[in-house]
Image (tube, rainbow, N blue to C red):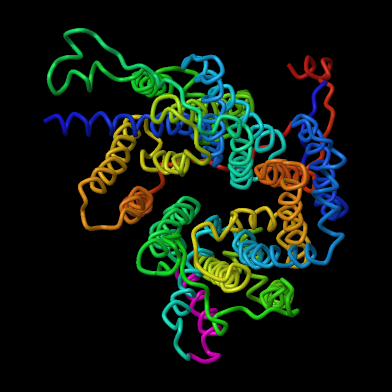
Amino acid sequence: MQLVLEKRAERSNTIALVSPLIAIGLTIVTMTILFAILGKNPLLALHAYFIAPLTDGYSLQEIAVKATPLVMIAIGLSLCYLANAWNIGAEGQFLIGAVAGSWIAVKTQGTDAGVWVLPAMLVLAAAAGALYALIPAICKVKFGASEILTSLMLVYVADLFLDYLVRGPWRDPQGFNFPTTAEFDPVATVPLLIEGGRLHLGSIIALLVVAAAAILLGRTIKGFEIRVVGAAPRAARFGGFNANQLIILTFAVSGALAGLAGIIEVAGPVGHLQPGISPGYGFTAIIVAFLGRLNPLGILIAGLFLALTFIGGEQAQIAMKIPLDVTKVFQGILLFYVLACDSLILYRFKLVFPNRQVASGTR
Amino acid sequence: MELVEAIVLAVLAASTPLLIAATGELVTERSGVLNLGVEGMMIVGAACGFGGAWLTGSIFIGALFGIVAGTLMSLVFALMALGLAVNQVATGLALTILGVGLSGLIGAGFVGERITPAIHLYIPGLTDMPLIGRVLFGEDAFVYFSIALIMAVWWFLYRTRAGLILRACGDNHVSAHALGYPVLRIRTFAVMFGGACAGLAGAYLPLAYTPFFIPGMTAGRGWIALALVVFSSWRPGRLVVGAYLFGAVTILQLHAQGWGVGIPSQFMSALPYLATVIVLVLLSRARTGGSTAPAALGTVFVPDR
């Protein structure tokens, strides 16, 4: 008796719909076991992770704030992955966007620069993120170099570059030697939506990005091309779609979105440029993209869910001394289950009983 | 002269983890599987390897812990990518994300602890020879093992029947399956070998390179090992050259920082990563006359029956 995979005649839409839910359920079961191993009360821990953050207004706002960069980056990544282009360096594009936008903020600091500062920062950050993402895209298209490896290597380079700037030329002279720029001026700061709250304009921008992506993928020829090139490269060639051009396009768009997310994070919740502005948003966004089934609306929901795990993880650390790394383990396990459940959309398990008679008959 | 000797010793030490991890990944990829989780397997190997050595006081047991940890991680990958036919790129990424989290969790207990690092060989007379003595006869066991390992892999791939079958799986899994070879089982072993090597390479860092564990101490070495496999055109001989070249870049930039060259240290630290990008571009460009990669690399295989 043997358990084998068998290709389904056609993809199962039921499983496509419920697979993220099964994956979340399995992850929670696994986490319960992990909490028990760590010697924590699993019920209290799960409560701290998934329920407590939903019960007060501050945490709810904080979830939206954390979801903002995740959703923006994941939307861009989903376009890449749909087109079978593997941008895994969104973390680097996020950092370069943050650096480029901060350049304007640092240079206009203390001057009477007007309201143009913030829009200029956003535009420059998006452009810088797009250009940074174009490096691996062009290396791929022109020279055939693996975009997976090159885009990832550039994450380390971006990280070191940011580190150099805030320890060197951009360091706040009044900052007690901490590696950080001075606090940005009000004109260089993303405005809050609620006075005294945490929610800022970036969340609205993220929602607009989701809507734009939904229109692009669902209603335009370009979106159709992206999906065909990824799903059926041969058909795409017959259709005359240019796969290389789409690699360039999707990388540029995802880089721009990551860069935009970077400056919004710095000019919003953080308020200045410093190392460690990202708790791995660029990598977590990969999970968001897959959990959201590479679908804009799905990504919005998945982004909120993973933001919940960030906030829940912080609260569990404060309340129950659960290490923050548990959040990363949680996210990794979740991605595994998502991918495993997705496999069942195309395949089904089948028990095979080797039939000796048939076997000997054919001999 | 002593400086040259010191630099060569440092280059060998910096290259060894790259060489071990890349050797494992080379075998995995030769069987047709692209496991991008090397970084994750390495960092878990580093945490478990240090934990093992710290608890038992034995470097050897630490190395074994690293190997077992890496192998277990690779089994998760095999279950997903081979058992469930999941996209290998996505699975590899998931393995790295999981590994970074797990290593932090495992290593949290012994951050700040120190162990006695692996001892170096000492043969009176030979090791004392000027210039080449310490380089040839004064290394730690990992360095010698890594060289023996890559030679063994070369012999296995090109001089044994099993190696030929493994390469056949990597080049054309349908034909290999039609000839009656158990493609998925062979690939599982190849993935496990890659995991064992990555775990050992990770363990080398806290056991011999620096005698303590810090979260994220692999610092992208797993990804550089992946690039090295591309650099080597999937050939063991070139892999050795590539690993030592990269070790040399790493050490030279460190020395350049020490000599006070007027370049900010962060720019020098970025050199190995930039070098990887440049090398990938140059190599891929030189290879316009057809790819040398295993033909079935990274593709899903579900046997029909």
Q: Residue at position x 23%, y 47% from top?
A: B256
Dividing the image into 4 quarters, which one contains the N terminus of chain A? top right
In terms of image quadrants, where is residue A238? bottom right
Q: Is residue A10 visible?
A: no
Q: Residue at position x 64%, y 61% from top?
A: A82
Above or below, comparing residue A285 to residue A251 in the picture: above
* Image location of residue B296, percent across then percent down: 54, 40
Dividing the image into 4 quarters, which one contains the C terminus of chain A? top right
Q: Is residue A300 left or right of residue B213?
A: right
A131 drawn magenta: yes
* Image location of residue A226, percent across then percent down: 63, 67
In depth, the one of A238 and A209 nearer the eye is A209
Residue interval drawn in magenta: A113-133
Magenta region, main secondary structure: helix
In depth, the one of B167 and B218 nearer the eye is B218
Tell which residue pokes out farthest to the top in this image.
Answer: B124
Above or below, comparing residue A181 to residue B249 in the picture: below
A101 drawn magenta: no
Q: Is residue B182 visible?
A: yes
Q: Residue at position x 50%, y 30% from top?
A: B198
Above or below, comparing residue B263 to residue B70 in the picture: below
